[in-house]
Image (tube, helix red, strand yellow):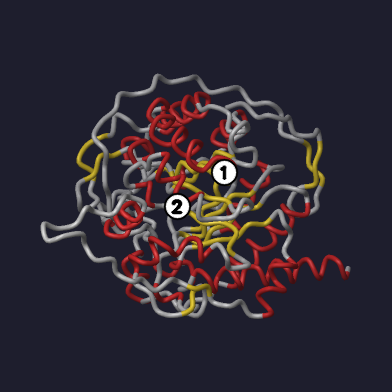
Amino acid sequence: MPPDDAPPPTQDDLFGDLIAAAPPQPAAPERAASSRSSRARRDEALAGDEPDAPASAELDLGLPEMTEQADGDDDGDHDSDAEEAAVDASASPRAAGTANGPAPRRRRAGIVAQPPEDDTLALAQALSPQIRLGTSSWGYPGWQGLVWAGRHGESSLARQGLSVYAQHPLMRAVSIDRGFYQGLTASQYERYAQQVPDDFRFTVKAPSLVTDAMVRSEDGRGRQLNDAFLDARLAIQEFIEPALQGLGPKIGALVFQLSPLPLQMLDRLPAQLDRLHALLGALPSLRAQAPDAVVAVEVRDPEWLTPDFVSILLSHGTRYCLGLHPKLPPIDDQLPLLRAMWPGPLVCRWNLHRRHGPFGYEDAQKRYGEYADLMDPDPDTRAVLAKVMHATAQAGHPVLVTVSNHAEGSAPRSVKALAEAVVALSGSTAGG
């Protein structure tokens, strides 16, 4: 997908230094798309201890060596199967009833938005309209008093919670992670779109069918190589087209999160870059149906983070999705890559606190319980992310950041703290 507009010859970077636009890079050779294999449902799992291939030294990101083999990469914020079924069932006609007559209709208490506090309203008004913040999914009972008033079950929140979530003054985006396990239909996406206002934006993860190099068993361990990995035809059919048809202009970012690669593929990373180049080159433009939307690529192996990777993204007008996850370098060490991608929109997913390690979702779930409290504040990550967000918005580019409960313990509280950090920078800039 070629970029719609060429960048200016020079541009202030994120931190005020004048930089020249990068010279055009030679395109990587295209690689034929592979045939489709069975769809993989995956959970997080530990694997072997063999060291991975060394990272490129061409772009100095301070990449740590990885000593654990890639696993099935569950972000831990997807809706459960029961919740997914509830969402779909809620939009279907009611069952005809029993032999003894129609099924009785149960009176259902509605979900009501928690009235926002004055400081939250002031924060929302002070934020740049370029900035959209949100969380990874929304069906959490522990957000009582933060997002909804009263206690509600996960199933009810999955069915009815999105429209209430979207009333929160700081929640102008959400990440739909459910489609990672199985691609959603246009009608499923449309049901989500109908629940939110026009200026709301969705970050949507592509199905693992095309983003995981392995076909995995139920415990997350790789069974065999996935022939459909980065298959352009399937990506368009199972992801791009349904999302465009269902969400339309409410798409913020369509994210290809590339799961950890097996060692034999990491050792042949140029071949994987060729696959990525071919995929991105085959995708249709989003502009006609979703003018604000971008395609973004998120990775779980730091070996991807090289000048060749940057060159491929830039050549197709694709954004790097800043992944804040223990499998990747800290945000400070990813700043050179963000500078190399400048100028353009910022897409970020803050996934997991570094204290839990690269395979720590289960530990995070146990520690954070119902996700009501900010148990592990990460002010260092927040401060740097706020600076990048502020500078990007000031330059007139969209900012789309979604936060997981596993980042600090409670995604709504993280969103508020991040908004406070950005607004504080805005105040200091105005004052200076």
Q: Mark 1 packing: few (<14 Cα in 10 Å), some, or many (20+)? A: many
Q: Nearer the viewer, residue 181 or 324?
A: 181
Q: Nearer the viewer, mark 1 or mark 2?
A: 2
Q: Position of residue 226 (x, y in %)?
A: 28, 34
The vertical placement of 18 against 377, above or below, is above
Q: In the drawing, does residue 104 fall left or right of residue 307?
A: left
The total of numbered circles placed on residues is 2
Q: Position of residue 239 (x, y in %)?
A: 42, 36
Amino acid carrying label 2: it is Ile
Asked which quadrant contains residue 331, the reply is bottom right
Q: Nearer the viewer, residue 422 or 197?
A: 197
Quadrant in which the C terminus is drawn:
bottom right
Q: Mark 1 falls on what kind of element?
A: strand
| Residue at (28, 66) in percent of width and height | 105
Q: In the drawing, does residue 320 fall left or right of residue 128?
A: left
The residue indicated by pointer 2 is: 176
Q: Nearer the viewer, residue 180 or 222?
A: 180
Task: Determine the CA span between mark 1 and mark 2.
Answer: 18 Å
Asked which quadrant contains residue 187, the reply is top left
| Residue at (49, 45) in percent of width and height | 298
Q: In the drawing, does residue 113 fall left or right of residue 366?
A: right
Q: Position of residue 347 (x, y in %)?
A: 59, 49
Q: Mark 2 packing: few (<14 Cα in 10 Å), some, or many (20+)? A: many
- Residue 379 is marked as none
The vertical placement of 200 against 360, above or below, is above
The residue indicated by pointer 1 is: 320
Q: Mark 2 falls on what kind of element?
A: strand
Amino acid carrying label 1: it is Tyr
Q: In the drawing, does residue 223 fall left or right of residue 99?
A: right
Quadrant in which the N terminus is drawn:
top right
Extreme-front residue of the structure: 101
